[in-house]
């Protein structure tokens, strides 16, 4: 028998004390109350697993009390004590949410096994609640780090839409944390007990992605030896997150549109539609309006996906959060590599805040992991940063763009110099250019 906390509510003092003694001998922690009001007060003070309550109390009845307890403490189980001839009251109490009922006097030998069953159920429910809480901490909005206005406003939007079944389109540059936001929306929704399925639409060929998303019937193509359930079926009742939705093939866009409109789709090789109940979250770093103009993306699908748009800010737009994120990653990787590192130098932080972060949070995470691996002391200082971040004081002042060709070249040269620890001759060799060309480019980009 699992042990827990019990509350006995009965106005008969002798019976109340007898039951308390019996259950204490079984190892339970027992509380008592003489009426409903006192019992509810005990429930406010203690996390009670099982309540034993008389069906007739001076100030209420067991049926009303059961309803009140289950409403306010849904994981607490209730056993109603009935007198001979009032079994009907016990049945009514069960309908009101009680675990079971027992007749006083005649069923004494049944009390211990019945309490044991109720305790097992209550403790299981408590475990589920605790695990759900830990899951929410790991994947919910509490996981999103940042105090800047840019990120706070976005979180507020996401929290509001999470409570609905509305389709959400997450926009933003690569590395801004779109999948983490999608997970947080799922965990804050009423679908959080069901599956969250994430798929990167750019990671598969068109035919393979169709099979992954929708499944197929045996014999529908060479190698299809048995029926396969698709990711939409796996996510039934929950949420599916379609990352890089802008990469989706035109034929699959039409199929996805049907799912959005009817919650139905056809498996490859099937003639009967499959019905699902799935919330769709999508993300892209592309400008889908431009993709529509160029004929690469369906306008009708865009309007169905973008019922609610959330644009995640780039890291350079939320500089106040850089130190917080860096400290979080430092703690994470310090535990991972088993080092004693607990501080970021002021110059280290300044260099991070001055850098434009074309790779956003993902790039920052990689930089901190590298610094932790290289560190020999308890502090991360600027000497542990990549070459391109260390050289921030000599940059031209022109912000790096993730798409501008000259910015890409500049960043690549910086990374190669970092790899060669500043050896320009070796860097020129790796870049397959002459040393004079390298010096010219260093001057052009302000990297001398």
Image: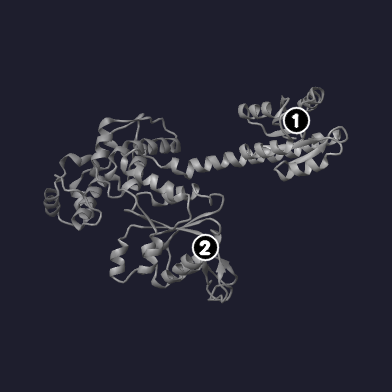
Q: Quadrant of residue 195?
A: bottom right
What residue lies at 56% left-to-right and 43% top-to-bottom?
132
Q: Is residue 208 visible?
A: no
Up-down relation of residue 138 to residue 284 (above or below): above
What residue lies at 81% left-to-right and 43% top-to-bottom?
88
SS for dot 1? loop
Residue lying furthest right: 106
Q: Position of residue 85 (x, y in %)?
A: 86, 39
Query: On the picture, is 148 further left or further right than 405?
Result: right
Q: How many labels does the image show?
A: 2
Query: On the picture, is 58 further left or further right than 134?
Result: right
Name the quadrant of the N terminus.
top right
SS for dot 2? helix
Query: On the picture, is 291 further left or further right than 80?
Result: left
Up-down relation of residue 290 to residue 418 (above or below): below
Q: Which of marks 2 and 1 is nearer the N terminus?
A: 1
What residue lies at 73% left-to-right and 35% top-to-bottom?
61
What residue lies at 41% left-to-right and 48% top-to-bottom?
158
Q: Which colour scheme is used?
A: one colour
Q: Can residue 179 be seen in this view?
A: yes
Mark 1 crowdedness (10 Å alpha carbons): few <14, some 14-19, many ≥20: some
Query: Which labelled disc corresponds to residue 57?
Result: 1
Q: Where is residue 94 in the image (x, y as percent from the top left)?
A: 74, 43
Query: On the picture, is 254 further left or further right than 109?
Result: left
135 or 339: which is nearer to us? 135
Mark 2 crowdedness (10 Å alpha carbons): few <14, some 14-19, many ≥20: many
109 or 392: which is nearer to us? 109
Query: Which labelled disc corresponds to residue 234?
Result: none
Q: Name the residue under label 2.
A: 232
Q: Position of residue 312 (x, y in %)?
A: 34, 50
């Amino acid at each position: 028998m699992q042990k827990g906390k019990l509350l006995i509510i009965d106005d008969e003092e002798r019976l109340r004390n007898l039951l308390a003694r019996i259950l204490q001998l079984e190892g339970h922690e027992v509380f008592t109350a003489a009426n409903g009001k006192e019992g509810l007060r005990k429930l406010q003070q203690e996390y009670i697993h099982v309540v034993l309550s008389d069906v007739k109390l001076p100030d209420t009845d067991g049926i009303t009390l059961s309803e009140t307890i289950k409403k306010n403490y849904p994981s607490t189980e209730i056993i109603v004590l009935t007198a001979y001839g009032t079994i009907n009251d016990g049945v009514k109490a069960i309908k009101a949410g009680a675990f079971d009922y027992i007749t006083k006097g005649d069923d004494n030998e049944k009390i211990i096994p019945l309490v044991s069953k109720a305790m097992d159920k209550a403790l299981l429910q408590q475990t589920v609640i605790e695990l759900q809480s830990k899951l929410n901490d790991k994947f919910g909005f509490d996981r999103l780090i940042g105090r800047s206005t840019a990120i706070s406003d976005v979180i507020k939007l996401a929290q509001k839409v999470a409570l609905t079944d509305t389709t959400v389109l997450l926009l933003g540059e690569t590395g801004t944390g779109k999948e983490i936001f999608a997970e947080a929306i799922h965990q804050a929704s009423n679908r959080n007990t069901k599956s969250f399925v994430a798929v990167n639409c750019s990671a598969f060929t068109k035919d393979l992605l169709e099979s992954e998303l929708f499944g197929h019937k045996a014999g529908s193509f060479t190698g299809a030896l048995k029926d396969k359930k698709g990711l939409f079926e796996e996510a039934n009742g929950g949420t599916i997150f379609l990352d890089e939705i802008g990469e989706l093939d035109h034929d699959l866009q039409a199929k996805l549109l049907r799912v959005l409109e009817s919650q139905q789709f056809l498996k490859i090789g099937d003639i009967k539609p499959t019905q699902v109940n799935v919330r769709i979250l999508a993300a892209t770093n592309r400008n889908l309006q431009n993709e529509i103009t160029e004929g690469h993306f369906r306008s009708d699908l865009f309007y169905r996906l973008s019922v609610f748009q959330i644009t995640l800010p780039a890291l350079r737009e939320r500089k106040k959060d850089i130190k917080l994120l860096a400290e979080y990653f430092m703690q994470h990787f310090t535990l991972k590599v088993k080092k004693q590192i607990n501080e970021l130098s002021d110059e280290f932080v300044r260099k991070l805040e001055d850098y434009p972060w074309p790779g956003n949070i993902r790039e920052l995470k990689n930089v901190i992991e590298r610094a932790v691996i290289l560190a020999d002391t308890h502090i991360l200082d600027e000497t542990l940063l990549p070459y391109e971040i260390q050289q921030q004081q000599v940059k031209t002042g022109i912000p790096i763009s993730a798409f501008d060709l000259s910015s890409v070249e500049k960043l690549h040269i910086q990374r190669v110099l970092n790899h060669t620890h500043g050896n320009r001759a070796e860097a020129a060799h790796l870049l397959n250019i002459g040393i004079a060309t390298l010096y010219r480019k260093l001057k052009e980009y302000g990297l001398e």
